[in-house]
Amino acid sequence: MILPPKDFCKKLVLFAIVLLLISCSQNRDLQLPKLFGDHMVLQRDKPIKIWGWANPGETVSVEFAEQQQTANASPDGEWAVEFPATSSGGPFALDVSTARQSLRFEDILISEVWVCSGQSNMNMPLASWGRIDHFEREIREANYPEIRLFTVEKAMAAIPQSDVQSDGWSRCSPETIAEFSAVAYFFGRNIFLETNVPVGLIHSSWGGTNVEAWMSESALSDVANLRDAIADAKKSTVQSDEKILQTYKNDLKNWYENTLEKDAGFQNDTAFAQPEFDDSGWKSIKLPTLWDRVGYESFDGVIWFRKTVTISKLPENGDDWVLNLDTIDDFDITFVNGKKAGEHLKRNHPTRYIVPANWLHSGENTIAVRVLDVGSRGGIWGAADQLYLASPAIDTIPLAGDWRFEIALDNGESPAPKRPYLHKRPTVLFNAMVSPLTKFPVRGVIWYQGESNISQAFSYRELFRRCITDWREKWDEPTLPFYFVQIANFYQPDPQPFESKWAELREAQQMELDLPNTGMAVTIDIGNPDDIHPKNKQEVGRRLALIALNKNYQQSVPYSGPLYRGNSVENGAIFIEFDFADGLRANGDSLTGFAISGSDKNFKGAKAAIADNRVKVWHPAIAEPVAVRYGWASDPDCNLINNSNLPASPFRTDDWDGITKKQN
């Protein structure tokens, strides 16, 4: 038998591979991006762009609103058509077909579309971990079928992607709104109610993310201190990221198990959890609160909490009870009468456990909670009325108030493994969660981000400006409306004026208002010193909507609080002038939040008063004032508003170097 030469065999194999590849490429299913589907909204008054993929060279027919277009797929299988801009209308159907396949999408509206992006305060849902103010009522009343919702799933990518991951569009209803972005929803609801036009909301956000993660490589290419990080991000793969995350999970699991072994509360058959344990020597604490508030600012580790509650009589129906502890930072194991009710290994997770009726008895019952804090602040915190033990058959037993506590383990010598925040890397979220959207015409963008860039506040001035410009370039719309939230008050109030990263970040945000078609919703008055995720998202959405209503929907509504314009020094005082200053007044008895200094840069809390629609600021000990600051703190006590009850943005009249300039 004569065998063919080796070269011939190699060529034959290569030829077979080529034929296989050609065959595969010629059997590509007709496909459109996830943005196209039932219930979608297309932007009115802008060209309607529809695109997708098919076999190379295949003819694609697109029918929409009694119009038809055809296109031939490129060698890469891409095709696109464009219909003329049109005013509001619908519902329509979209039919896309080839000789082999056809797709049909129904209930499509032409109206208003907004992209809603940022980090956790944009990501915060109405329910689950968000539990915004009055969330149950808000969900129950969310019957707005002409508000359409689209959520981009969290994803990272080393290079720009052609499509996002998503479950598609849905009509707004109590069944669909609970896990949607609260800020986006309240923004869209206000627009809909004030304009009576349908609104499409494209939500794309991820908590704990820096602005540079949301920017393209081209926007960051000349930022010297990010080049290495960008290069590393480009080398990443799904497999390499999964390996890093799995290593972290293993390390965290081992570390967590080590804390259980060393925990004094577990040394004698879960001693601290047992009802008979004598906790009379423990200290007292009033819950809910973070332990940072009671002298344990730098403590990371395990603290046990115990409380005895009296049940006068158990109900006869035998129904399970509910133990609600609002929010625990970070991890908990909770016991009722020595039995484990549950365990959470998620930070700041809503803590709600079902307690079997036979675990409880008439008389005294003991609740014990092991709280492990891995970093920053810790404790059982939230709303007092959300700490309770409840049964359907009897009155709710409140648990807020006096508890006992004991430190069981200090993690100072054995800190938790550091979490790899891969989603913070430059470009990775833009590539996966924004770039695929940029062919889709929209009215504008709303943005809530900045907390993760606090330590780089000075650099944020340029980075945020680049981000806005970058998105406008990618959408090919140089003046695309871009409205953002100035970060809210947070952390403990500052008794004396001093430097603040939070104030510098707010200043960086306000600087972007000199870009055209930008707007800023000030939230310095509706934050929470204990919660970086304040729950009044209704007002955040309303303030963003005011900007859009004024700038995009021709409604003469006030949309901004007072913004610093300039100052003059007169007779030992500094007079501050503002834009949006109609009806300047204090939201309270007298103005607060002002500080003043001389040339020594030593700021003192100042007196302030309204004078001819300006604010006069002075201090008896400063005869020659040089600079004024207002609301210059992480959680300032400041109350200047205008006649629209909108708060003034924090500001300073000086340009002295802050603390973050040295860190950038």
Image (cartoon, helix red, strand yellow):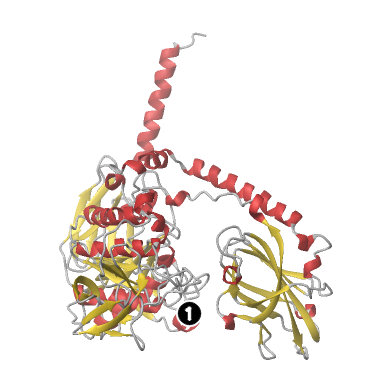
Relative image position of residue 332 (x, y in whole percent): 66, 65
Residue sitting nearer the eye, 205 or 219: 219
Residue sitting nearer the eye, 641 or 394: 641
Q: Which residue lies at the image location 18% right of the left edge and 82% below the top edge?
A: 556
Lateral position of residue 631 relative to residue 373, left or right: left
Q: Which residue lies at the image location 80% right of the left edge and 64% below the top edge?
A: 270
Image height of 430 relative to 351, above or below = above
Q: Which residue is mark 1?
A: 135
Q: Which residue lies at the image location 30% right of the left edge and 64% below the top edge?
A: 507
Residue sitting nearer the eye, 315 or 350: 350
Query: Could you say whether the residue bearing mark 1 is in a helix, strand or loop?
Result: helix
Residue sitting nearer the eye, 442 or 47: 442
Relative image position of residue 345 (x, y in whole percent): 62, 61
Asked where in the image residue 199 lies, by quadrant, the reply is: bottom left
Relative image position of residue 168 (x, y in whole percent): 39, 63
Image height of 345 relative to 325, above or below = above
Asked where in the image residue 389 lies, by quadrant, the reply is: bottom right
